[in-house]
Amino acid sequence: MRGNLLFVFGALAVILAVQGCGQSGSGNKKAQQPMDGFTSGIAQFSADESFSPIIDEELFVFKSAFQDAKPVITYKPETGVISDLLNDKTRIIITSRLLDTMETGVLKRRALTPEVNKFATDAVAIIINRASNDTTTSVSEIKQMLNGKAKTDKSIVFDNPNSSLVRYLKTLSGNNELKQKNIYALSSNKEVIKYVSTHPNAIGITGFSWLNDPDKDYADAVEKVKIVGVKDDNSKTATNEYFKPSQTTLVQHTYPLSRSLYIIDCTGRKGLGAGFASFLASERGQRIILKSGLLPEVIPQREINIVH
């Protein structure tokens, strides 16, 4: 009798062990499955904080249209966005530059192929206090200021040192330091606008998207600054003309300070990254960009109803 009981208990133990293994294997298999689809699920994005106004607008409409979609977007300076991608903290980023050869090589060694989609063009705006008499500048003058060669007592302010804007200005000026005594890095585009609004002797450099439809917490500051017209010294068609940033000057390439916006998806599948990229490129997504004042990659057609 005792031998039979031992046999029964032994058989039960084996059955439970097999079931436990089966459940564990099932759990692992489930954990390995993608948590997102084209318009559903959760996916981690890392985005350049310089473009949070337009991305937030796009995200609001996207999530309203696809309520099962839950993209989680973390805003960071450009260096942090690229670092997240290279360190596999995310595989979907929104940035204002293409990946360089080294970065592409890192992804290639991990068998990841970037899917790159440009969806808008932003302008880099030069702003001053409304009390200032200055109304124009040129690309060469901006370069001289950034290199400390311009005779000016004005302070030049821009967002934080790790931003895409600072990288843009370094490339523009050919100066990797930007450490002149009258050049200051603040914390954000919003802080730049607020600073210039209260300092008549300041020149601010900021993303154009921050000056269109501002939030209430800095809308008053936007009213107290004005945008400077910029001349492209190397232009062959408009050598003596000054242009302010607008959709017209961006599409005509007459405003000389601009940068592209890209969504880069390295997941290798049609998940939420591809879904959001598709939405950004859609007529609805492009209309949001058009309304924001930035230049959409594809200008949506206007429909005119003629009533007889």
Image (cartoon, grey):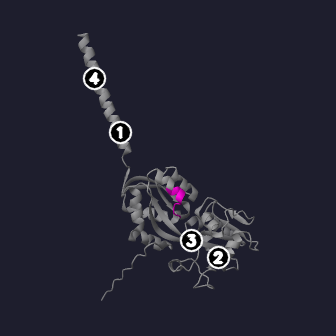
Dot in front, 1 or 3: 1
- Mark 4 highlights which residue? 12
Task: Say what secondary structure mark 1 lies in.
Answer: helix
Residues marked 2 and 4 touching at CB (< 8 Å): no
Q: Amino acid at mark 1?
A: Gly
Q: Identify residue type, mark 2.
A: Val
Q: Where, by quadrant of the figure, is residue 227 drawn?
A: bottom right
Give the x, y percent position of residue 143.
67, 72
Residue 145 part of the magenta-drawn span: no
| 1 vs 2, front mark | 2
Residue picked out by circle 1: 27
Visible residue check, residue 40? yes
The nearer-to-camera label among 2 and 4 is 2
Question: Which x, y percent locates residue 305?
Answer: 34, 83
How far separated are the C-alphas under marks 3 and 4? Answer: 70 Å
- The Cα–Cα distance between marks 1 and 3, rounded to whole angstroms, is 48 Å
- Between 104 and 140, the residue placed more toward the observer is 104
Answer few, some or many: residues within 10 Å of disc 1's Cα (few below 14, many 20 plus, some between 14 and 19). Answer: few
Q: Earlier in the sequence, mark 3 or mark 4?
A: 4
Q: Which residues are magenta?
A: 97-104
Mark before the other along the chain sequence, 1 or 2: 1
Residue type highlighted by circle 4 = Leu
Mark 3, secondary structure of its residue: helix
- Can I make out residue 74 in this image? no
Residue 32 vs 72, above or below: the answer is: above
Q: What residue did someone put label 3 on?
A: 208
